[in-house]
Image: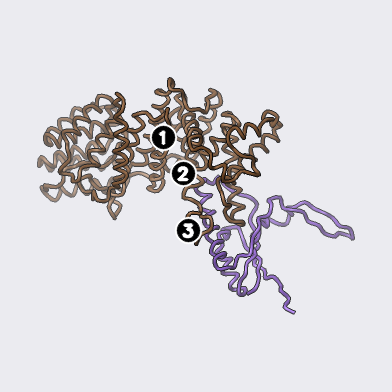
Chain colours: A brown, B purple
Amino acid sequence: MDGRPESINQLVDHLFRHEVGRMVSRLVRVFGAHRLDLAEDAVQFAMMQALRLWAYKGVPDVPQAWLMRVARNRVLDVLKSERKLHLFADEADVWAGAGIAEPRTASAEELSRSADEVVDERLSLIFACCHPVLPRSASIALTLKVVCGFGVEEIARAFLSTEVAVAQRLVRAKRLIRERGIRFEVPTPEQLPERLDVVLEVLYLFFTEGYAATTGDRLIKDDLCAEAIWLATLLTGNAVTAQPQCHALLALMLFQAARLPARIDTAGDLLLLAEQDRGLWDRSMIDLGLRHLGRAARGDKLTVYHLQAEIAAIHATTEHFTKTNWEQILALYDLLRERQPTLVVLINRAIAVAQVSGPAAGLEALKMIPAEGQLERYPFLHLAEGEFHRRLGHLNEAALCFLRALDFAGTEPERRFIRRRLATVQAGPVAGQPIAVDFGPRESS
Amino acid sequence: MSRFLLLLYQAPTRDGELSPEDIQRIIAKYTAWRDGLVQRNKMRGGEKLTDDGGRLVRVQSGTVTVTDGPYSEVHEVLGGFFVIDALDYNDAVEIARTCPHLAEGQRIEVREVDAMNC
């Protein structure tokens, strides 16, 4: 069926993970939001049954329909044992209304339901998981578990947390959904602005965590980036949710993701933007990003996602580092600073200042960053400062800054990267490449 | 070519929380193993048995007694079986050796079907 005759019913990559969101959203729609736990358990049950049975019998013709059937029957069995089935006396009608065929006949036709309807169900689930009353950390965990089909252990790995902590967040989130009676539906246009902001924030956090070059497990991080892009794509495909800021966020993620293959060298070391082989950047992703950036320009909104996407677009479409339009990038960082004066934005702005007006101006810009919170402990601040000193020929100051950066570096790849910079000043004056570190849009928190 | 039974025994369910991705990975391993045998025309079928342990029917002191499984002296259950074709025991054992079922605490019993070539 997939054109690979040597293999019988080969499963599509990530099929199980992606089916979770589809199945949970449909079960919740039929049996109610307060049954989220039951829906999740039934989906897990169906997948474990598949594991046991398919090992002996092979993969069925339409694995998605098989899984849905088993999960649905599991829910009915549990309700029967709780003597609550009468609440769903017209369950067959409900089921038919939800477009799910009877278990004995369901097969390919079940899958041919309108794609819009399936997307709506998914979006309803996303909006429930990213409801404003839930703490962000809970929304992140819940969305990854219920919509994206990540396991608890995978979520812990992606966010450098423990399984216990993730499990607690999930329990808390589900309790809040029950207690507050959060509904599983796409918000009305009136509610949309507030609700959409939270969803975008959660997707942005997925992506920045996935993009972070130097911490955690690369495989799971790539999955995280892919999920964020996929969910943003769903949002841009729905008439109500396809707002300009969704297109902007999707464009930003596509530009950044396009650079992933070039960001690390063969030894696993982080490369400067100036050092990256731009031929390795994914052109088709950049083109897609440009299309979404075009759609983001419709309307009069200018969000932080617009500004970041514009900056990323300049890098993505400049064929060589030395041709980068730093004036334009600085202007965008100035606007971004007004809306989102985070440490990362301020440091990146200082780097743009240095590119436009020279390293001394860059140092001045760094000095103006308010000394608060974790500033001193942030390695990239010292790294930027050291780089500006290096270019001014202040090699001793530069070395001191790099050593300070080394003190606060969190991971081995970060330390290796900083040691390489340190070597450039200890070896004597070097013209070298100006710094522009590809740490992505990561937040300082 | 002779016919063999592969009897797959497993410890009573001790599944941790497997993620959907984990589950798919394991299924993919079984599928690859099974497909390999199908392509070499050696797979004759397989069935999964239910998890309840079944019934034991036997004669005790002259009367037939029926007991519900699982049986106290057995710490593992027969989870299912495959019927395969193989040249001889060596060949059958090689096939069993590559089966993803083989993990800590699980075992496969390889038995030849007696064709009684008479």
A289 or A209: nearer the viewer: A289
At mark 2, the secondary structure is: helix
Tell me the tag on residue A154: 2
Residue that sits furthest to the top in the current view: A190
Residue that sits furthest to the bottom in the current view: B118
Image x and y of residue A168, in percent: 51, 34
Quadrant including the C terminus of chain B: bottom right
Tell me the tag on residue A237: 1
**Mark 3, chain letter?**
A
Disc 3 to disc 1: CB gap under 8 Å: no
Tell me the tag on residue A4: 3
Image x and y of residue A328, in percent: 18, 33
Q: Judge the density around disc 1: few (<14), some (14-19), many (≥20) Cα neighbours within 10 Å.
A: some
The three-letter code of the residue at mark 3 reads Arg
**Mark 1, chain letter?**
A
Image x and y of residue A338, in percent: 25, 24
Q: Residue at x 43, y 20 (%)?
A: A190
At mark 1, the secondary structure is: loop
The mark that comes first in sequence, 2 or 1, is 2
Image x and y of residue A163, in percent: 49, 40
The mark that comes first in sequence, 3 or 1, is 3
Distance of label 3 from label 1 (alpha carbons): 31 Å
Disc 2 to disc 3: CB gap under 8 Å: no
B80 or A411: nearer the viewer: B80
At mark 3, the secondary structure is: loop
The three-letter code of the residue at mark 1 reads Gly
Mark in the foreground, 2 or 3: 3
Q: In this view, does A32 lie to the left or right of A348?
A: right
In which image quadrant can residue A333 be found?
top left
The three-letter code of the residue at mark 2 reads Glu
A293 or B29: nearer the viewer: A293
Same-chain status of marks 2 and 3: yes
